[in-house]
Every structure is written in C-alpha cells, then in structure tokens.
Image: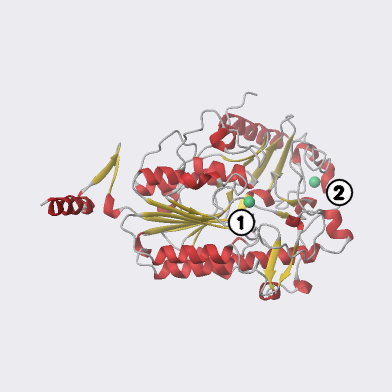
Amino acid sequence: MIRPIIRFIHSIFRLRVFLLLSFGSLSVAVEERPNFLIIVIDDLNDYVGVLDGHPNAYTPNLDRIAGQGIVFTAAYCNSPVCNSSRASIWTGLRPTTTGIVSNRSGWFRDRPGFEHISTLPETMGRADYDTMAYGKVFHMGHGNKPANEWHLFLRYNYGPLQDPKLNYNYGDRLTDWGVLSEDNEYAASHDPRIADHLIEALEDTHEKPFFLAGGFIRPHTPLYATQQWFDKHPKEHIELPDIIADDNKDLVYFGKYPRADKDIEAPGLFNQEYAEENDKWKDLLQAYLASTSAMDYQLGRVYDAYLKSEYRDNTYLIIFSDHGWHLGEKRHWGKAALWEQTTRIPLIILGPDMPAGIRYNHPVDLLSIYPTVIDYAGLNAPHTIEGHSLRPVLENPDTEWIHPVITTFSDHHALRTQHWRYIRYVNGSEELYDHRDDPHEFENLVVTNASSEQIQKVLITHRDKLLEALNILK
Ligand SMILES: [Ca+2]
Ligand SMILES: [Ca+2]
C-alpha cells in the first residue's frame, strides 16, 4: 500500500508542468525553463576571425557560432586577470564591491560580507536547475573551493604532467611555448577532456533544466599546441602588431616605469625586449594563435554536440573570455593592464528566438552575464547585482546599451564608451584615447592635447561617469 502512495507522490512531483516558480513579477513555467551552456575561455583576446583582432587568426568554429547568434564586437572584461574577472562574473558584483581586484585578492568568500553570497550557479541550483561545471570556470588558484557552488564540478590541472620545457626561459613553466608531439600527454590534457565532458552532458537525458559550464584553458600560457595548429599559422606569414618606438613617453603611470609599479602585477611573462632582441616575437604570436586554434577546435566539437542535442531549441549558449592579452601591443605583454588589448574580449550569445548573424557594436561588459541568465530563467536576483540583463539587446539589437562599461585592476579603472577609453590610476593620473582616430591607443590625449577644450570636456564627462559608477568621491 505504501509503494503506490510513494509512486503517486513521485508522479505529482514529476508533473512539474503545472507548477510555476514565482519570483515577484517574473514567472516561468518550470518545464519551459531554458537550459544554459556557458563556455569560458582563458586569456583569449580579440585574435579571433569575427573580431578582426589579428590578420592571422584562425578560429573557424568561433566564427561560425557567431554567425548563428549575436557577437558583441565591443565586449570588455570586468577585470583584466583571471581571479577578479571570474569572481565578478559569477557574483554579479563589481571588483570594487567585493574587493577582489586582482589575482592576489584571494577567494571572495573569505571577504567579510561575502561569505554567503549566492553565485550564479548557486542561484540556479536553488531554483532547481541541475548545475554542472567542468574545467576552469572560477579561477584555478582559488578554484579548489568552488566545488560547493555546483551540484557536479570537475576540474583538471596540468599536474602531475611532466613539463615539456620546449623553449623554457624564465624559470616559470608558464613562460614556455612550442610544438607538442602528438603523444605528449599535454596534447590530450585539459581542453579535449573538458570538451568530452560537455559533449557527454549534452548527450545525456536531463530531468531538470540544466546550467552547464565549461572552462577551456587555452590560449593561457604555456602556449602549447600540436603541429597541425602551428601549420595553420606559418611563421613567415605572421604579422606583427603595430607599435611605435616612443609610445610610453605620454604614459602617466603604468607603462611609464615598466615593472616598477609594485601594486601592478608583473606585466607579463614575456616582454618586448626579449621578443625583439631574441627575434622571438613571431614565434610567440604563432604559438598564441596556434593555442587559440587548438581551443577553437574543441569549441567546435562542443558546438556540434549542441546542434545535435535534443535540448538545442531550449538552450542558450553563451561564450566569452575572461580577459584579453597583449603580445607586444603598446609594448606590453600578458594581461594586467587597462588598455584595449587586455580588456576587449569575444562575447557571443545564441538562443531560442534570438536573431542570428548580428554584430552588436555598443560597449558592454561581463557584469551582464549573471543578470542575463537569471532573466531568461525567470528568477529574481538573490542580492543586489550590479550589472544589467542583455535581454533587451538580444531581443532587439537596435537597443542602445547605456550602462557604464568599466574594467578594474587593483586600484585603477578604465571606462570604455563608444569612441573613447578613459583610464584613471590610483594616484589620479589619467589617460584618454580616441578610438575613432587611434585604435592602437598611441596618443594619450590628456598629455598630448591637454589644452583642447573638447578634450577637457570629454575628460570631465568620463571622469564623472566612472567615479559616480564606482561610488568614488572626487
Ligand atoms: Ca585568464
Ligand atoms: Ca603613447
């Protein structure tokens, strides 16, 4: 007698189609709630075909995905290093709010007031989503702890792999790059395995809606790839970024005294002097481009599984990188800066009933990931998140994005508007670049054109907008 009763109770619970989750004014029928597949790429700048960031880019999969959705051509990270970028994305809070402003800031749950903050996966899990993550989704260094954020979480390290030490230079294996032999265990590690797991998850049958995330680690250093990906980028055809010899002379803080700024992390694992003096610039570009193409191949495998999945018509696919990377632009290498090359990232979103093949050109940032996902899931924010849902743009790409687009690193900040980049360092020094005339940010107008009334006006507008958004007193 008991068993039929239990079965009856179970059957009631299975009939979730009749249940509505109500969150204030929002309500979405449980059975109709969409799934989410989110792919985070590590250290990928705009060297992808669809962003025209480098003439030698070879990313056919990212490009074909972009053709089926909306590509944000002016998307910027919230912070230009892994930890602070990802902490901001998954908490929906600015780096200045949590205090997680660099890789040195630690884990946000160790910060007073943020111990119990509901991350996006937790919010989804509490709303009865199945939440699964593979690879580097939160930061690796502080990423041992996020197991609790997901129902299922699996990460991969490189270790205990033997370092190949192909062109090992600075005593840190993260400065290595080069061609991996096919049988090197690195070649099959991480990204291919993350792709396998994502594909498997897409092929599985899910009783509940899912929130599935995967984190690829290429093109993060070491810049390893097998020969086939180097072959896509013959060294003799590699084009060098545009730089000018005296670019640093109008810098006011970072970049003026390379590596001397103690509050800024080492500006990269390679540097311009090394690249030029040792004739390695093209080798490093080639290795970065090859690493990117190798990751792109794995992304393509996952995308094909998404296309074949029974969940395709009810699943949003969101792809982005945590921040960009310099390979000599502005004579800088690596991340941890506030210029275009470190802050601009690919962001692509596809989903049911969304227009395809759209390029959205207004600046946006990654604070919007959290609110966008919960918006489509029909959930209210569990705490005061600081970004805004991209849904109005995704439903009508003619919508103008009016929210401030800010990148924070340490105590320094950048504001990107349609034509301008404004940077303010902790000591109040500033940079201003006009992207209509100066896409490479060669000319800091604060120094070179200080007497211009127009420049002063732009400067005041941007300064006020930045300080107001960050609630910083002048
Ligand atoms: Ca990163
Ligand atoms: Ca300059």
Q: In front here: 329 or 266?
A: 266
5 with respect to 63 (left or right): left
First in residue order: circle 1 vs circle 2: 1
17 with respect to 70 (left or right): left
Question: Residue beneath label 1, please?
Answer: 157
Q: Is residue 55 visible?
A: no
Q: Which mark is residue 246?
A: 2
Residue at left offset 67%, top offset 71%: 184
Q: Is residue 71 above or below residue 399?
A: below
Q: How dense is the environment of label 1, judged by Cα within 10 Å: few (below 14), some, or many (20 and up)?
A: few
Under tag 2, what secondary structure? loop
Measured from the top left, where is residue 54 in percent x and y? 68, 63
Measured from the top left, where is residue 472 in percent x and y? 61, 27
The residue most toward the left is 1
Measured from the top left, where is residue 135 in percent x and y? 54, 56
Question: Do tag 1 and tag 2 residues touch (Cβ < 8 Å)?
Answer: no
255 with respect to 421 (left or right): right
* Mark 2 sits near ligand 2, with its Cβ under 8 Å away: yes
The type of residue carrying mark 2 is Asp
Q: In front here: 28 or 394?
A: 28
Q: Is residue 149 visible?
A: yes
Residue at left offset 80%, top offset 61%: 168
Q: Tell me the CA gap for discs 1 and 2.
A: 41 Å
